[in-house]
Image (tube, rainbow, N blue to C red):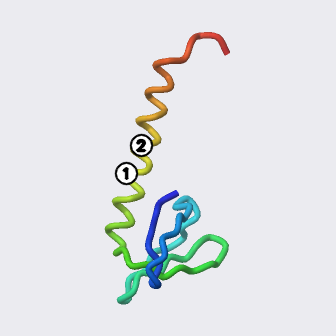
Amino acid sequence: MIKLTKRNGAECLLNHLLFEIIEESPDTCITMSNGNRYLVLEAGEQIREKIIAFQAAIIQRAGRRDDNMTAEF
């Protein structure tokens, strides 16, 4: 999940895996796969960068976990 800022200034965590479309016209509107829509302050490119950073962090953590695992399953 990534942290974004709603138009009223409140922060929220959204599951980026459920994003269907991100539109800028001029406000940034995220439409989720369930039809919910969120207006956020971040631009589309900022959201994309947050998603990339989040995914990279997951991969990095998974790599560290694999180093500590034994052959026993």
Residue type, label 1: Ala
Kindly identify the residue that appears in the image at 44 percent across and 79 percent down. 9
Q: Residue furthest bottom?
A: 26
**Residue 68 percent location from the top left of the image:** 50, 18
Q: Are marks 1 and 2 in contact (CB under 8 Å)?
A: yes
**Residue 28 percent location from the top left of the image:** 41, 81
Kindly identify the residue that appears in the image at 53 percent across and 79 percent down. 38
Q: At numbered mark 2, what does the secondary structure look like: helix, strand or loop?
A: helix
Residue type, label 2: Ala
In this view, the residue in front, 33 or 39, is 39
Label 2 sits on residue: 57
Kindly identify the residue that appears in the image at 45 percent across and 69 percent down. 4
Q: At numbered mark 1, what does the secondary structure look like: helix, strand or loop?
A: helix
Distance between the alpha carbons at the discs numbered 1 and 2? 6 Å
**Residue 72 percent location from the top left of the image:** 64, 11
Label 1 sits on residue: 53
Q: Quadrant of the C terminus?
A: top right
